Amino acid sequence: SLPAAGGITVSVVAFFFTIKFLFELAARIVSFLQHEDRERRGERTIYDYVRGNYLDPRSCNISWDWKDPYEVGHSMAFRVHLFYKNGQPFPAHRPVGLQVHICHVELAIDIPVTQEVLQEPSSNVVKVAFTVRRAGRYKITVKLGGLNVAYSPYYKVFQPGMVVPSKTKIVCHFSTLVLTCGQQHTLQIAPRDEYDNPTSNSVSLIDEHNYSLSIHELGPQEEESSDVVFEKSVVSNRQTCEVFFRLTLHSRGCFHACISYQSQPISNGDFDIIVLSENEKNIVERNVSTSGVSIYFEAYLYDAPSYTNTQWQLPPVHLSSSQRRPSTAIEDEDEDSPSDSQTPEKVKKPKKVYCYVSPKQFSVKEFYLKIIPWRLFTFRVCPGTKFSYLGPDPVHKLLTLVVDDGIQPPVELSCKERNILAATFIRSLHKNIGGSETFQDKVNFFQRELRQVHMKRPHSKVTLKVSRHCLLESSFKATRNFSVSDWSKNFEVVFQDEEALDWGGPRREWFELICKALFDTTNQLFTRFSDNNQALVHPNPGRPTYLRLKVYEFAGRLVGKCLYESSLGGAYKQLVRARFTRSFLAQIIGLRMHYKYFETDDPEFYKSKVCFILNND
């Protein structure tokens, strides 16, 4: 019985080994058939499998033409070496279906690649070339017939390049800083490489040697200007790629500063500085925090061109506190001049005026008989209004300020409290735009303020039933009686004769269609200066009579709705599918018209007519 039992055991073991061999054979045959090109399957036989005469992804290997880590911006390459299962080189010129995908892990950016078959002795090498510009970790996937080659996917890290001054910026940049004498102020600098990657790869390991600061006083002549007393220190965090520039000035006045990296100015490193005493700072803070009251300063108005031809000197000047005078909204806005576009008659001697600074505007007025106000100039409190700081005037020996918004003629004023006036304007500007003059910071501040304004209003759903066949009319009728609270609610759009739940799709489609119905020039509500489809649009002065003015009001409410929805972020974000002319946008925000707007609104007209007049008249 024992020999019989032993024979059964051997038979069972042999049976299991046979089954395992057959399963492995079937799996390999299937794998062989999957990796062969369909057009060449008839040329292959099971005998090719037995000999290992087929392309096997696991038998291939990859070699890299660089050593980790490597900097961005260079042309990179790696080589895929193709082999048969039996280890013999596989000719790469034959179609093999090599697939290469390179993607930035964090940013999900796909990198284009090129493939080239190298004419080497065995001709089994495919060179894959690519270029990365964003630093970080990349995933490189190489496949043959849907299966990974060798140990694919691979992960490679590319480092940022060296610091480039033209790409390096000051975070939360201001064109003018208001500082206090003797108090330290910190500027945050974001070092960037050529491709705008955060980087800490500096020429010197000590950032105190990399970054320098030059400051000179505004106003006096170069031969009379003295050295500005200031202290600076540079502290860096190489892990977060941040540099902190600490600055302290010990003298009052107006200065111009420039931050450089390795003697090259950084992107936004030029700015002005107004340094106040502790008492002057308190006056400015009180001026900015006072609401409903316009702050005024006594000044003298000069002809605009005179400051370019007069040589002035800057003696020591002791500034006094500003004066405050209540002013009603009517007095401040409308009653003092029949037209804002009028300019005062040029005078040879300075004219006594009063400069009013409010959170929204900077206006220059004179008073007839000391009681009748007459507005001479008005400037908006916005980044477009620039100040130039000059020395004392030749008559009253008061510090001079030139105000220019690029649209109106420059206004030259001499004022005993010039620095306080300018600092009040600058602080009001910073308060209006959220503490930074960079575009993204202003967008974030605007959206944050918009959410704050509508915070108490409900964001519940309101049903909007419209028809596709008459979308503009039905939408206008559906929202005709909407209040501000209704426009702040979440629209649930329902198209007539269509059964669909609005989970965001119909609402987004409605926004897209209604924007096209309003702003497409074929509907004649808006028009453009040229026939170019990419040209900017503005309201059509020759619109058909059946398009009422109320439609423009509806268009404005729709734009406001999109801005509010975008401020909420996420799925609520809506884009206005229209590109308005700069002159139209200027009218919306209260700027005067200027021929410079033709440069973007109607480039052909600007190049052919406006430039000819400017160059020849």
Image (cartoon, grey):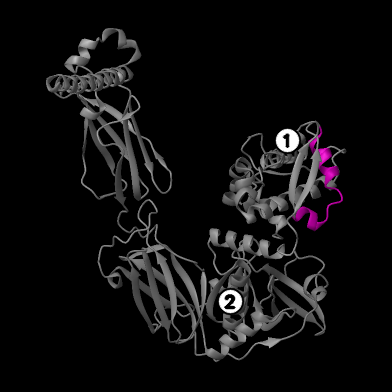
Drawn side of residue 70 relative to residue 454, left or right:
left
Q: Position of residue 78 (x, y in %)?
A: 24, 36
Judge whether 504 appears above or below 170 on screen: above
Residue 1 within the segment the image draws in magenta: no
Residue at 83%, 38% (x, y): give it. Answer: 473
Sequence-first disc among 1 and 2: 2
Front residue (pair 347, 122): 122
Rendering coords of residue 536 (x, y %):
65, 43
1 in relation to 454, above or below: above
Task: Give the residue type that dot 1 points to.
Answer: Ala
* Callout in the foreground (1, 2): 1
Q: Is residue 127 above or below residue 138?
A: above
x 80%, y 57%: residue: 484
**So how many labels did they put on this image?**
2
Q: What x and y, as percent, mark residue 603?
A: 60, 43
| Circle 2: residue type | Leu
Provide the residue designation for mark 1: 500
**Secondary structure of the magenta portion, mostly?**
helix
Q: Residues within 10 Å of mark 1 (few under 14, many from 20)?
A: few
Mark on residue 401? 2
Residue in the foreground of this view, choosing between 112 and 612: 112
Q: Height in image: 392 above or below 158?
A: below
Position of residue 45 in the picture relative to residue 240 (left or right): left
Region of the chain picked out in magenta, as a range:
470-488
Tag of residue 60: none
Identify the secondary structure beneath mark 2. strand
Question: Which of the 4 quarters of the picture holds residue 41?
Answer: top left
- Looking at the image, residue 476 sits to the left or right of residue 11; the answer is right
Quadrant of the rendered image containing residue 285: bottom right
Q: Residue at x 83, y 43 (%)?
A: 476
